[in-house]
């Protein structure tokens, strides 16, 4: 039951270049999407989110794009910095969940090379 | 900045033993969650808690699991009789209002031997 999929377990990018992390989902009842970043031995920290009524949300170096028809979202980090090296989780929130739980993907480990 | 805290950071236990994982959510938050992450896998929802009762639980959250908010600040997850497959990172999260994003604690690594 993989409702949220991150098909790339890892990604390496040179410092200063763009990092693109992808996420696919299967449930059309998801109406809110988030990206969390996780460093080793720490909990996930919120990065950026997007509502299903939008197709883009930007916050500094981070931009999330949502393609509802393709059930796909992506996180762009530009320019990438070594401190961005972490595991990135895509998460979705189903509108049918009264408790607003999150359903997470398996994560993509980003390594930004100096 | 306020944060969610969890204790202990690492708990080692023997199979069949009971464990209690503790969380202190952010003080004015009202909704509380437990998630877990088995090594190398995704973060999975276990249970949500609001107004002193469970509001939703996953299939993973069987009769061996229970949650409690014993004193208005702590939020605990109890596993009554641990199994090897309970070995995972357990994350607590909280939010003030339903439209907020969830704040996660640093996690407790549970190792069942």
Image (tube, rainbow, N blue to C red):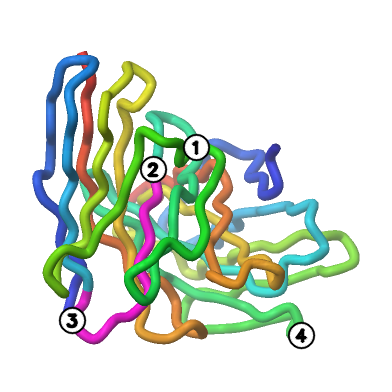
Question: Is B36 or A80 nearer to us in this picture?
Answer: B36
Query: Would you say residue B85 sits in the magenta stretch?
Result: no
The residue mark sitting in front, 1 or 2, is: 1
Determine which of the numbered discs, if any, sits on residue B60 in the image: 1
Q: Distance between the residues labelled 3 and 4?
A: 32 Å
State the image coordinates of residue A43 (x, y, percent, origin top left): 29, 55
Are discs 4 and 1 less than 8 Å apart at CB?
no
Are discs 1 and 2 less than 8 Å apart at CB?
yes
Q: Distance between the residues labelled 2 and 3?
A: 22 Å
Same chain for labels 2 and 3? Say yes or no: yes
If you read the primary sequence from the N terminus, does the residue marked by circle 3 or circle 1 appear first? 3
**Residue drawn at point x = 13 percent, y = 36 percent:** B10
Same chain for labels 2 and 4? Say yes or no: no
Residue B82 shows up from this direction: yes
Q: Distance between the residues labelled 1 and 2?
A: 10 Å
Please state if B87 lies on the left or on the right of B27 as rendered: right
Determine which of the numbered discs, if any, sits on residue B27 in the image: 3
Same chain for labels 1 and 2? Say yes or no: yes
Determine which of the numbered discs, if any, sits on residue A53 in the image: 4
Chain identity of mark 3: B
Please state if A84 lies on the left or on the right of B70 as rendered: right
Q: Give, as a single range, the part of the protein colored magenta.
A: B26-35
**Residue that badge 2 annotates:** B36
């Amino acid at each position: 039951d993989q409702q949220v999929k991150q098909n790339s377990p890892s990604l390496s990018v040179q410092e200063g270049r763009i990092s693109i992390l992808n996420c696919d989902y299967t449930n059309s009842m998801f109406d809110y999407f988030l990206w969390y970043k996780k460093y080793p031995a720490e909990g996930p920290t919120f990065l950026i989110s997007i509502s299903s009524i939008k197709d883009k949300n930007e916050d500094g170096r981070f931009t999330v794009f949502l393609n509802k028809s393709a059930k796909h979202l992506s996180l762009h980090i530009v320019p990438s910095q070594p401190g961005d090296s972490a595991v990135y989780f895509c998460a979705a929130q189903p509108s049918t969940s009264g408790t607003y739980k999150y359903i997470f993907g398996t994560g993509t480990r980003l390594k930004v090379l100096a | 900045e306020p944060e969610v805290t969890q204790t202990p950071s690492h708990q080692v236990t023997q199979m069949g033993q009971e464990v209690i994982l503790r969380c202190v959510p952010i003080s004015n938050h009202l909704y509380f969650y437990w998630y877990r992450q088995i090594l190398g896998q995704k973060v999975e929802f276990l249970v949500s808690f609001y107004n002193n009762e469970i509001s939703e639980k996953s299939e993973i959250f069987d009769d061996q699991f229970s949650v409690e908010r014993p004193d208005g600040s702590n939020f605990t997850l109890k596993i009554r009789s641990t199994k090897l497959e309970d070995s995972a990172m357990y994350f607590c999260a909280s939010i003030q209002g339903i439209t907020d994003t969830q704040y996660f604690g640093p996690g407790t690594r549970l190792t069942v031997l």
